[in-house]
């Protein structure tokens, strides 16, 4: 696929005996249940693409680069409770990614609790993934910008351990240090639910409470630690407050723009501009909200027009497996009906999983004649600029 990835066949937990040492479920496949799509390029464009991805670091600011069960409805809870999430090494080797911010199971971590985000479950997920990645000769965990350059040079992929909420720190500031010690290098302030740090995007009753006083301390601690901060899923006021109090640039690892056509589920221009004003970067979100690569790139172009090419990257937020079935299961589980707009696309054409997304994003940029320096920035350069300051 135009990369020189050095993948030699290690699959997750190969050091154990599946079925004996842990309960095994059948895992999803790269292209099952949907029609793959690749942006067509001329021979000349293919050659340019090859050079671009060989010479520049390619970084995903937000994905879940691991497998879900093939039969999500039947097997998801066995998979989650077993606590052995399988990193998709082989599929990652078929993408040009050098580094990927890996958001883990997040609120789906559910060994002890139905509601997710519990400290023990998060630690279990992060540490178990780390134990597996340590056995891979292809992937390694990322703790420095040098690791990203090294991954590209050696044909490997480096996994940036990240989480989408601080809910599990409860009232313990020192847990931020513990998470850093466990390798986490990027933390979301809140998921959709509020927590002790701030107000969640989906948790506003009559007024938006923004960041808490404890949250101000948490931001300060993350700045001191060298933990990158993301305001994805935070309420508008929380996002603006974090931008105000942080000493370092921040991320919104995955966002869509309200005025770019997302309505209330997107971020306001004010929020996006505030993030850019910290020196930060916004990753463009696909997930299941959009029908195809073209609409995804409309959002990308909208954000570039709004905040400038130095402040935009890509955080597709996709995974390996049947995401529609996963949303159905989660909807049933939490007793919420998912909006029709979320469920209308059984798959996202050209962006259905990290491999497809990350092959097509650079192809689209080449196809649309973006200059080399701009491609370098949005594929990874902008994220690395922020990490050089933060880490
Ligand atoms: Zn998210």
Image: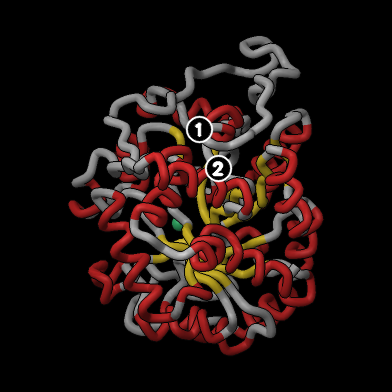
Checking the image for residue 96, the label placed there is: 2
**Which residue does the image show at 74% across and 57% down from the upper left?**
179
Tag of residue 148? none
Residue shown at 76% from the left, 48% from the top: 150
Q: CA distance from mark 1 to mark 2?
A: 8 Å
Q: Quadrant of ligand 1?
A: bottom left
Q: Is residue 244 above or below residue 24?
A: below
Query: Which quadrant of the structure image shows residue 242?
Result: bottom right
Q: Residue at x 47, y 59 (%)?
A: 314
Q: How many marks?
A: 2
Q: Look at 65% across and 61% down and name the residue there.
A: 186
Relative image position of residue 16 (x, y in whole percent): 73, 16
Q: Residue furthest bottom?
A: 244
Left-right relation of 256 to 378:
left
Label 2 sits on a secondary structure element that is: loop
Residue 332 seen: no
Label 2 near label 1: C-beta < 8 Å? yes
Mark before the other along the chain sequence, 1 or 2: 1
The percent position of residue 89, horizontal first and vertical second, equals 60, 31
Q: Camera-side residue: 20 or 137?
A: 137
Q: Secondary structure at mark 1?
A: loop
Query: Where residue 311 sits in the image (x, y, percent)?
Result: 51, 74
The disc placed on residue 1 is 1
Vertical side of 86 occupied by 359: above or below: below
- Residue 208 in view: yes
388 and 101: which one is in front? 388
Q: As rendered, which of 169 and 293 lies closer to the eye?
A: 293
Q: Residues within 10 Å of mark 2 (few under 14, many from 20)?
A: many
Q: Position of residue 253 (x, y in %)?
A: 51, 63
């Amino acid at each position: 696929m135009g990369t020189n990835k050095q993948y030699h066949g290690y699959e997750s937990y190969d050091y154990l005996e599946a079925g004996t040492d842990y309960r095994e479920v059948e895992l999803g496949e790269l292209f099952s249940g949907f029609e793959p799509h690749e942006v067509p390029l001329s021979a000349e464009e293919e050659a340019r693409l090859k050079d671009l991805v060989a010479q520049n670091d390619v970084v995903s600011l937000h994905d879940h680069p691991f497998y879900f069960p093939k039969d999500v409805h039947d097997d998801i809870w066995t998979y989650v409770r077993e606590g052995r999430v399988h990193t998709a090494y082989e599929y990652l080797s078929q993408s040009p990614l050098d580094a990927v911010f890996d958001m883990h199971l997040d609120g789906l971590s559910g060994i002890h609790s139905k509601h997710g985000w519990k400290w023990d479950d998060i630690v279990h997920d992060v540490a178990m993934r780390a134990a597996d990645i340590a056995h891979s000769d292809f992937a390694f965990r990322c703790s420095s910008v040098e690791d990203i350059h090294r991954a590209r040079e050696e044909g490997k992929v480096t996994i940036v351990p990240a989480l989408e909420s601080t809910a599990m720190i409860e009232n313990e500031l020192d847990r931020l240090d513990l998470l850093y010690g466990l390798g986490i290098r990027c933390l979301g302030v809140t998921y959709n639910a509020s927590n002790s740090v701030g107000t969640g995007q989906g948790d506003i009753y009559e007024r938006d409470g923004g960041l808490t006083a404890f949250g101000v301390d948490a931001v300060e601690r993350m700045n001191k630690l060298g933990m990158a901060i993301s305001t994805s899923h935070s309420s508008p006021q929380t996002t603006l407050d974090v931008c105000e109090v942080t000493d370092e640039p921040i991320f919104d690892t995955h966002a869509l723009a309200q005025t770019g056509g997302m309505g209330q589920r997107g971020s306001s221009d004010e929020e996006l501009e505030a993030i850019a004003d910290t020196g930060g970067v916004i990753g463009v979100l696909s997930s299941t909200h959009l029908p195809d690569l073209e609409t995804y790139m409309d959002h990308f172009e909208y954000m570039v027009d709004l905040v400038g090419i130095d402040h935009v990257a890509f955080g597709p937020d996709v995974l390996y497996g049947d995401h529609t079935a996963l949303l159905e299961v989660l909807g049933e589980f939490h007793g919420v009906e998912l909006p029709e707009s979320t469920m209308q696309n059984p798959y996202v054409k050209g962006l259905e999983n990290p491999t497809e997304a990350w092959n097509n994003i650079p192809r689209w940029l080449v196809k649309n004649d973006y200059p080399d320096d701009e491609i370098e920035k949005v594929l990874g350069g902008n994220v690395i600029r922020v990490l050089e300051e933060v880490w």
